[in-house]
Amino acid sequence: RPRLVAANALTHERKNSIDLYLQENPQYAEDGEYVQANYKSDYLGRFLGQSGIVVPPSEGASVLQIGGSDPDQLYKAVQTVMEMTERGHCDYTAINLNCGCPSPKVAGKGCFGAALMDDPKLVAQLTTAMNEGCQGRVPITVKCRIGTDSHHAFNKAEYARIDEDEEYKRLCKFVETIASAGVVTDFSVHARIAVLQRSFSPADNRKIPPLKYNYIQKLVQEYPEFTFSMNGGIETIPQIQSELEASPGLKGVMVGRAWAADPWSFGMADELLYNHQDTTATPANRFEILKAYGKHADYEEAKGNPVKIRRFITKAITSLFAG
């Protein structure tokens, strides 16, 4: 269950919170450790807070995805995550670097996301900085595509004629270069290239470039020392089962928008995919989920502005009743 936040947003809010604390408590200006442990963190909870940390049930295994291209910012962003963990706001099981988002605001103007796939040495520096920011206490992972269109202008007819061996070699170089830093061993790979042309929208990037699951299957076979998860175009449990069966070493299959659009259709995922027989963990119906979600909503409203929070709370639950 991933969550995405920009590194510059975290570092900006942390700096503002520390500056405000020092304005109110100038006597601690020379005591950096004390300030770091005591500045007000309520606003940062908006970016990083998880349900279930204080009031159960827990969210379960959750990955925080961070976007950025500056090593110092990513170091400070991950440092902020660890400070918030110590204060009880969150408890992420891994921190992931976004090298897959093709949005022009991210990969274009922002120069991170999928644009980072063209600079694997920088990615190795970024993941090293992230590892230093958490002092090696949390796994650092990477989410990427199989490549970008930087080596050939994209159109469907021309792309169908490219040398797939060369394209796969570039993907291997990306993986090897990042792993050589000794930090990252886990990769989630969207099985399409990212088209970084300004005329190509994020929606286009999710549909038009062809899926090449065989690249990920080859990575699994050729790099058994690493773990790989597959992403892109997979929308049902039978599809997940098919891909796991086709590639036994595959760590997992990532489903994003299809799950968000119809989460109830994945209600039996644990039982069907992992043979978990604990039926008490599976809600009997959607009304049970709605009641539990109501308790979560009450908790979230109590922490902040109810008017703003209700807009996000209600939007998140509407897809539960799809179909």
Image (cartoon, rainbow, N blue to C red):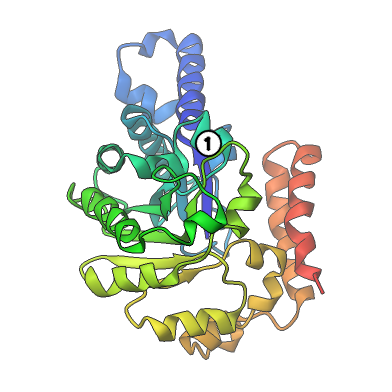
Indicate left or right for 305 with 273 as reference.
right
Q: Give the percent coordinates (x, y) of residue 301.
A: 73, 45
Which residue corresponds to the image point at 36% horizontal and 75% vertical from the top-left? Answer: 250
Q: Give the percent coordinates (x, y) of residue 49.
A: 55, 45
Which residue corresponds to the image point at 40% horizontal and 50% vertical from the top-left? Answer: 96
Relative vertical location of residue 86 with respect to residue 28 in this rendering, above or below = below
Nearest the camera: 30 or 46? 46
Q: Which element carries disc 1, helix, strand or loop?
A: helix
Q: Give the percent coordinates (x, y) of residue 257.
A: 64, 61
Q: Quadrant of the C terminus?
A: bottom right
Q: Which residue is mark 1?
A: 106
Nearest the camera: 152 or 101? 152
Number of numbered tags placed on the structure image: 1
For disc 1, the neighbor class at 10 Å (few under 14, some 14 to 19, many from 20) is: many
Q: Give the percent coordinates (x, y) of residue 40.
A: 51, 27
Relative vertical location of residue 323 with respect to residue 20 in this rendering, above or below = below
Which residue corresponds to the image point at 34% horizontal and 57% vertical from the top-left? Answer: 167
Q: Visible in this render: residue 62?
A: no
Specify the amino acid type for callout 1. Answer: Val
